[in-house]
Amino acid sequence: MSKIAATFSALKAQNKTALVTFITAGDPGKESTVPLMHALVAGGADIIELGVPFSDPMAEGPVIQRACERALANGVGIRDVFDYVAEFRKTNQTTPVVLMGYANPIERIGAAEFIARSTAVGADGAIVVDYPPEECEEFAAAMRAAGLDLIFLLAPTSTEQRIEQVAKVGGGFSYYVSLKGVTGAGNIDVADVAQRLTAIRKHVKLPIGVGFGIRDGATARAVAEVADAVVIGSRIIQEIEAAGKDGAVAAVQAFTTAIRTALDA
C-alpha cells in the first residue's frame, strides 16, 4: 500500500476527510519551502502538493502564476524541488508529498530520472497537468513499479471514456477540478459536484479529492460532505502573498488550522 493510500485508509477509519494543500516550491523565497511544508502539516494537512515552478502554467490562475514567477526569479527548478523533499523527509517520514506541475521539466530531465529522483528523496507521487491519461500508460506503469502514484485530473467536461481511462491508469487519488477554468476562479456548486462525483465513482474506485475554488472553512466543510479530500492551493498562496516572506509560515499554519478545524467540526 502506498503512503497516499495508507493515509486515506487511516482517515476513513476515523471518518475524516483528507486535507490536501498546495504551495509552489521556492515561493516566496528559496529558504521558505521546507518551513512552509512543516507549517502545513502542523496546521493539519494530510497530503502536500509541492508545485514545480514552470514558466507557462496553463491551468493556473493569476495567483499561482505569480507564485511560479517568484519561484523562477529565485532560481528554483525541479532539482531544487527534489532537494526540498529530501530536507523535509529528514524530520517527517509520514506525510505524503506529491510533486505537481507540467510535462516540460520532466521531459527535460527524462522520465526515468524523474522517477529515480522522486523515489530517492521520498516523494510519493506526481500530478502532471498536461500528461493526458490516454498517452502516458507507460509512464504510469513505470511510476507504479517504483511505488509512486500518478494522479490525474478530472473535470466537469470529462467524458465517460476519459473517466474510464483515469480509473485504469491512475493511482493515489483522483483530483476532480470542480470548475471550468483555471485555479482560484469562481465559486463551487456543491450540488453539481456531488452529482458529478456519483458518476465518476461508477468507474473510479480511488478516493476523490475536489479542488479549484475552495477558499474558506464553510466551503471546505460542504465539499467534505461529498468528497474524500478537499484540495486548497490558490487561497494558501494568497496568504503567503499577504503575509510576505517573514510572516508566511505563521499565516499558512493559521489558515490551515482553520480549515482543519472546519473539516473536523
Image: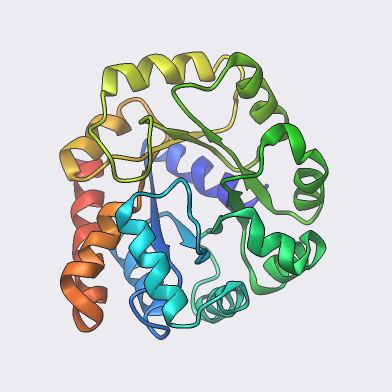
Residue 89 relative to residue 28: left or right: right
Foreground of the two, 32 or 69: 69
Residue 72 relative to residue 15: left or right: right
Residue 44 percent across, percent down from the top left:
32, 58
Above or below, 262 against 107 in this view is: above
Res 247 → quadrant: bottom left
Residue 107 percent across, percent down from the top left:
73, 60
Residue 252 relative to residue 229: left or right: left
Residue 236 relative to residue 112: left or right: left
Give the colour scheme shown: rainbow
The number of callouts visible is: 0
Foreground of the two, 7 or 27: 27
Above or below, 114 against 57 in this view is: below
Residue 176 percent across, percent down from the top left:
46, 32
Res 70 → quadrant: bottom left
Foreground of the two, 248 or 124: 248
* Residue drawn at (26%, 23%) of the image: 189
Residue 92 percent across, percent down from the top left:
50, 73
Res 135 → quadrant: top right
What is the quadrant of the C terminus in the image?
top left
* Residue drawn at (56%, 46%) of the image: 129
Outermost residue, front direction? 56
* Residue drawn at (41%, 49%) of the image: 60
Above or below, 158 against 78 in this view is: above
Foreground of the two, 261 or 32: 32
* Residue drawn at (59%, 39%) of the image: 152
Above or below, 25 against 63 in this view is: below
